[in-house]
Amino acid sequence: MDVYDAVDSRRAVRAFSAEPVPKPVLERVLTAAARAPSSGNLQPWQVYVVTGEPLADLKRRATARALAGDPGDEREYPMYPADLVPPYLDRFSAAAAQRYAALGIERDDPARPVKISALNSAAFGAPVVLFCYLDRTMGPGQWADAGMYLQTVMLLLRAEGLHSCPQVMWTMYRRTVGRIVGADDGLVLFCGVSVGYERPGVPPLRTGRAVLTETVTFVGM
């Protein structure tokens, strides 16, 4: 797949089929992704690939917490700034409305938070979830490295005909995740990435992007 096609077709898929993902494919993707940029070549990511019964157990435990209205474990880092301002707030609100309307959840539904959490904790049906951790001694530069690594992973998944959905939501249930994967206290959960084949018959959802002039300034050109 051409790299432009991979970038254009990558999106957060929220409807996966149960078709298993072959381990050799995941090994090929994760081996190649190790070439992602890494300042000082620290390669600060630590990834756990969870599938099969361990993932089913994790989904059951996390979904039970979600349906019980559990607010989740205390945050180790904020998902978003406390006070979003335009244009970031506008983009966030528009995307959220579009995303969950596509899943049949209206913004004024009083059960909306629980429904959203339950869908997320089921990994949208994905048969594989990658959990990316960093050592607690790492700083902002290494978190940026982890982001570039995960983008590389997601683009390589597209080259294999797979889709993905990055989910910071898993940090809400980080203690449950940690028990399943065996992560020690020296690691902090960055996010999970659901992986699989898109379920047929589900209309694709693509959120909009800002026009180039809103986010890019050319200097000296």
Image: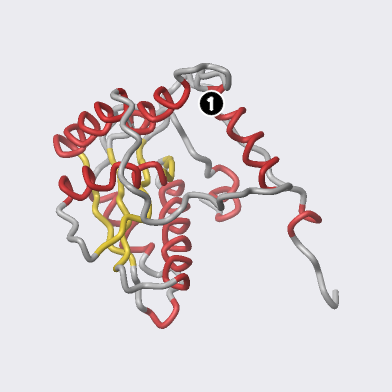
Closer to the camera, 30 or 180? 180
Task: From this view, report whether residue 135 is shown above or below residue 122.
Answer: below
Closer to the camera, 47 or 68? 68
Task: From this view, report whether residue 25 is shown above or below residue 102.
Answer: below
Identity of the residue furthest to the bottom in this view: 40
Question: Which x, y percent locates residue 43?
Answer: 35, 72
Task: From this view, report whether residue 209 is shown above or below residue 147.
Answer: above
Q: Residue at x 77, y 49 (%)?
A: 211
Q: Amino acid at mark 1?
A: Tyr
Question: Which x, y percent locates residue 198?
Answer: 42, 31
Task: From this view, report whether residue 133 is shown above or below residue 159.
Answer: below
Indicate left or right for 165 with 82 as reference. left
Identity of the residue furthest to the right in this view: 221
- Residue at label 1? 100
Closer to the camera, 184 or 30? 184
Closer to the camera, 55 or 16? 55
Q: Residue at x 49, y 17 (%)?
A: 110
How many discs mark residues in the rendered view? 1
Indicate left or right for 75 with 81 as reference. left
Q: In the figure, residue 38 lies in which quadrant? A: bottom left
Question: Which x, y percent locates residue 164?
Answer: 42, 42
Colour mapping used in the image: secondary structure
Q: Residue at x 36, y 55 (%)?
A: 76
Indicate left or right for 176 with 44 as reference. left
- Mark 1 neighbour class, 10 Å CA radius: few under 14, some 14 to 19, many 20 or more: some
Mark 1: which secondary structure?
Answer: helix
Question: Which x, y percent locates residue 141?
Answer: 47, 73
